[in-house]
Amino acid sequence: MYEQQSHSLLNAILNQIEPEFSKHDLRYFYTRLGANFYAIHSLFERLYGKRPDFAEQAQRLVETLARQYIDRSEELRAKDIEREQDYNWFLSQKWVGMALYCNGFAKNLQGMREHLHYFQDLGINLVHVMPIMKCPEGKSDGGYAVSNFREIDPRAGDLNDLRGLADDLRQRDMLLVMDVVLNHTSDQHEWAQKARDGYSPYREYFYTFENRHVPDMFEQSMPEVFPETAPGNFTWNKEMQRWVMTVFNDYQWDLNYSNPTVFIEMLDIILFWANQGADIVRLDAVAFLWKKIGSTCQNEREAHLILQLMKDCCQVTAPGVLFIAEAIVAPVEVTKYFGEDAVIAKECEIAYNATFMALLWDAVATKNARLLNQGIKSLPVKLERATWLNYIRCHDDIGLGFDDKDIELAGYEPRDHRRFLIDYFTGQYADSHARGVPFGQNDKTGDARISGSLASLVGLQYAVDIGDEQAIDDAIRIIVLLHSLILSFGGLPLLYYGDEIGTTNDESYRDDPVKMDDSRWVHRPFIDWQKAVQRNVPGTVEYLIFNQLKTLIAVHKELDAFADFNNRDLVEVDNPHLFVFERYHLQKPADRVLVIANFDKRSQRLDLDQLPRWSQSYQGHLVDAITGQSPEKFGNTVVVPRFGCYWLTEV
Ligand code: GLC
Ligand code: GLC
């Protein structure tokens, strides 16, 4: 868009731009800069316009974009153009991901390169490598306390290894996802060190206070992320004689985005990793980016403006690169991280669907889909050209992040129901085979969360320990059922490493002094490759899980109705154990899939007369795409096996 004020600023900036830039062919850069500059300027001005150095900062911003564009390889620039032409590329059902810790999966980056065939065997073509930037040996929050944003942690390898991995993946038509931890740095980061040494420009990178006045005001409305291990949101630093804002752990210093230098530094870092070959960048803890006294300091309007600005800037330099928002927040808040408009006010193309994740766990515990149905109904409709990241487990705990209102509508009392879920998954409930571990218990609020691997939470660990064949079978069925749902719901399915071979809890963290207080380590495994070989041995647990998931993934990729164009209708049925929805193809109405999931330990019936569209066509021609067989039926009633799932199609 052309607007005089921003355009004259842009001209002024380009007149002063460093002469070396003119040696390069910047044509594509300039067309994109021209297209986005009005938005970039408006957002930058809203955030930083009152500062006396505004024009200077705007100059630095544009130079940062240009410098990173110049550094972008021909190959990656060509990818950008390819993706501009095929802009819905990431909504395809072709992409199936896995998140992993590099050291837990294969020791280091070199090891990862040697295991790429494993992903391909399963059907994975998107790999999220959790943080591998340099971090301290001990206090690193699993890599989320970064001490150098431009170096690979030496334990994982170096930049060459990372580039090599990115190249290998690209050659196999696979995508690389990398973390950029935006909200904070490690207290060992150079910026924090300089702040401690008294360099005032670096003090401005963080929130520091000489006494408790301001921190106390903040505390009145800020919740605690890690109430047991890191209570409060500020930490006293002896060297500086100041309080530092540390929302997460006391060694994670929150960055101050009211300082444009911080914004530009972090944008530069995102673009740096884009240029190393990251196709998608996961932006960590984005809800926390803006701090305001009197608020929870989450989901603030300015946090959204910062993300919009980052997106607009990234589109100029590396438009093929997507953002994932990690915002584990209430359903009404989460869809805002897609932005307000897919073109003019976009934020992140992808967002964690933590609501769906938590609702799935509710259905596992209750063996019915009442809250799941209710919660999905309340999930706001998302933007076009935005997609969910659907997952069952990840490296973090499970928070029961659904609305109390929905719990009530599903017929439960919220406090009791949450208590039941915690008891259920920590195995304290009489009927439960789950072996989860509590996380983040907050005695002040009564809040609690759950750690534990998928296999241990669904009872596989228990069943194997006591050698109960029926219970083993049940647990495997639940594992497959949950995957069938993250694959069919619409969005990017993201498996968690180890789950594909039924990896159970790893208790060894209890002996490690830097891990013992953080139960999330119980589900951050080291893959035992000897055990993983069992996936080729028929009859083993590993075989049964791996091969069923492999089939699900392969079938998923063939069903065009599973691409995500907001093409899902929830179907209300009267059997509370069932979760039923329909996926359809926008251009080919006949391509429909009816997904039916049964969370109960007994077979359940679905009367197709409740679904007129499906009952008419039901002349024995329904086929479950997963098995290729007709579902078990009785008249017009479909029988769904215990913990079973169908993807019914018409043939
Ligand atoms: C993110 C990560 C989590 C980490 C937190 C603080 O939410 O997923 O593991 O503890 O950020 O960096
Ligand atoms: C909270 C935060 C999330 C973080 C998690 C770690 O849910 O919102 O960002 O990863 O805590 O437990």
Image (tube, rainbow, N blue to C red):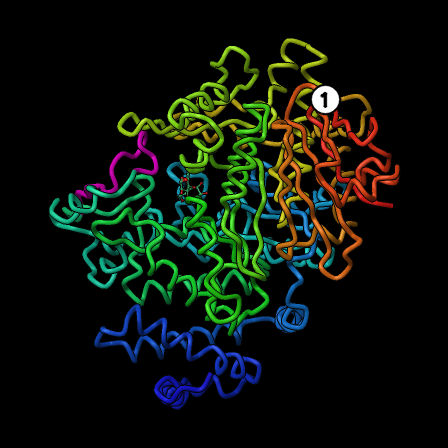
Q: Is residue 429 visible?
A: yes
Q: Position of residue 82 (x, y in %)?
A: 68, 71
Amino acid at pointer 1: Ser
Magenta span of residues: 224-239
225 in magenta = yes
Q: Residue at x 34, y 87 (%)?
A: 5
Q: Quadrant of ligand 1?
A: top left
**Closer to us: 275 or 436:** 436
Mark 1: few, some, or many residues within 10 Å (few <14, many ≥20)? some
Q: Work out whether 301 lies above or below 507.
A: below
Q: Position of residue 27 (x, y in %)?
A: 56, 85
Q: Is residue 188 left or right of residue 181?
A: left
Q: Residue at x 42, y 73 (%)?
A: 64
Q: Position of residue 203 (x, y in %)?
A: 22, 57
Residue that badge 1 annotates: 603
* Residue 50 occupies quadrant: bottom left
Q: Work out whether 31 lies above or below 61.
A: below
Q: Position of residue 127 (x, y in %)?
A: 63, 48
**Closer to us: 332 or 23:** 332
**Closer to us: 202 or 545:** 545
233 in magenta = yes
